[in-house]
Amino acid sequence: MKQRSDYIGILNGIRAYSILIVAGFHSWQQSWLQNLFPSNLLQFMGVRNFSLNWVPRTGYMFVDVMLLISGFCLFLPYARQMTDPLAPEPDNLRTFFKKRAARILPSYYLCLLLYLIFWVRPSDYANIKQYLQDIFAHLTFTQTFWPESYIGTKFPTALWTLGVEMQFYLVFPLLARVFRRFPLVCWAVLSVLAQVYIVLFAHLPQGNAESLRINQFPAFLGVYGNGMLCALFFCRLRIWREREWKQNRVLPLAALMLLLFNGAAIVCMLNDGLSRAAIIQRWQVDYRFLFSAMICVFILLLDAAPKGVQWLFSNRIAAFLSAVSYNFYIWHSTVLLKLKAWRIPYYPDAPEGAAAWPQSAGGEPWHFAWQVKYTVLFWACALLLAAFFTYLIEKPTAKQLLRKKKIIRT
């Protein structure tokens, strides 16, 4: 299948793998499944204690990657025009919001509707005010405005991310125009505003962090700014490579070496946070800007790396996972919690005083088998459900909403 000239295949993998890692973190929270590989697996390479525990247990950091990719992709048309005056004009205001609505709203509101029909009841709340507030916050994408609709919600907890995204969409058209004229100044202002907000509102005494404030839109301004600046560097570096290094075989190899170094630095950073951070949420918000900047470097290096390395992120499996990733993200926590509530697979009753059951049942003869079955069932059911909602709801609805303009993808 012929791809569009502006298609960036590696973003499929980065988006898809980030969402899968976030889901892996949520899966680990419910199963505590880890240490599937022996610690001496890479002893022949000098690695004394091999472990991939950091992948699921630091998965919360990859929510930032999802938002970073959003900032990157939305600003990309502006970045292309900044580097090539003959590039197509970015969408006008009406088209921009129409595309965002067609992409986000159908699947999102269907999820809310199904929850209201089957699972969310006024009796689940302390009073009717909290029930109505939770519904209002989710209908208006303001989940992170109140703790009741963020921490205490009866809807899928992951939906707060979409609230942050929609808030970004509202300011993006104006922000993009300012960023196009003053990219470095605008990036610096966004970065400083994010850090000031974090220090003033997200930091608590004794090294703690306010769990609501760390995930409010202003705390992500630096992440979005990094994504937008990365899009500009991406376009400029592509033009530079085409002009100066098109036939050079050394550059891809050099990019690969730097990419491996960058990837190792990201792994070390995540492991360091996992092993040494006293308060995970404080470490998360304090290292958010640096982590997103390192992901930007990863994207730029990956685009210059050999084609075989890029294929790991741009193959058909990555494209499929990226296509269903939105609905996968919406529904994955529901699948996790419902399988557990319905005891699929079966697990015995919790003994008196047991907490976090059955994931805390380590040592029980049935425990490891339950962990594996539960995890496999989760991934299979969540991906099937995501494909169902993507290809039977999301894409047909978007096609109908955008049929006059024929602008399904951005």
Image (cartoon, rainbow, N blue to C red):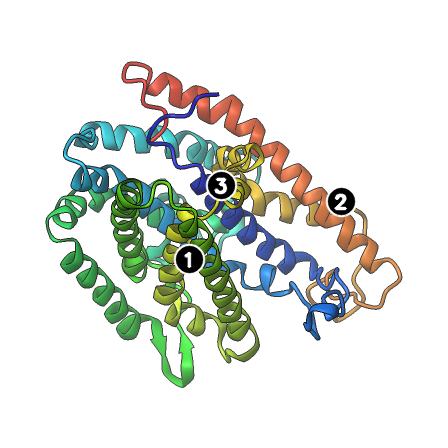
- Residue tagged by mark 2? 344
Left or right of 105? Residue 331 is right
Residue 268 higher or lower than 252, as above or below: below
| Circle 3 or circle 2, nearest the eye | 3
Characterize the local packing of mark 1: few (<14), some (14-19) or many (20 or more) Cα atoms within 10 angstroms: some
Could you tell me residue 223's position as x and y percent?
32, 57
The answer to which of marks 1 and 2 sits earlier in the sequence is: 1
* Residue type, label 3: Lys
Could you tell me residue 366's position as x and y percent?
86, 57
Label of residue 307 in the image:
3
* Residue type, label 2: Ile
For this orientation, the residue located farthest to the left is: 181
- Residue drawn where x is 57% and y is 30% of the image: 387
- Residue drawn where x is 47% and y is 38% of the image: 326
- Residue tagged by mark 1? 148
The answer to which of marks 1 and 3 sits earlier in the sequence is: 1
- SS category of the residue bearing label 3: helix
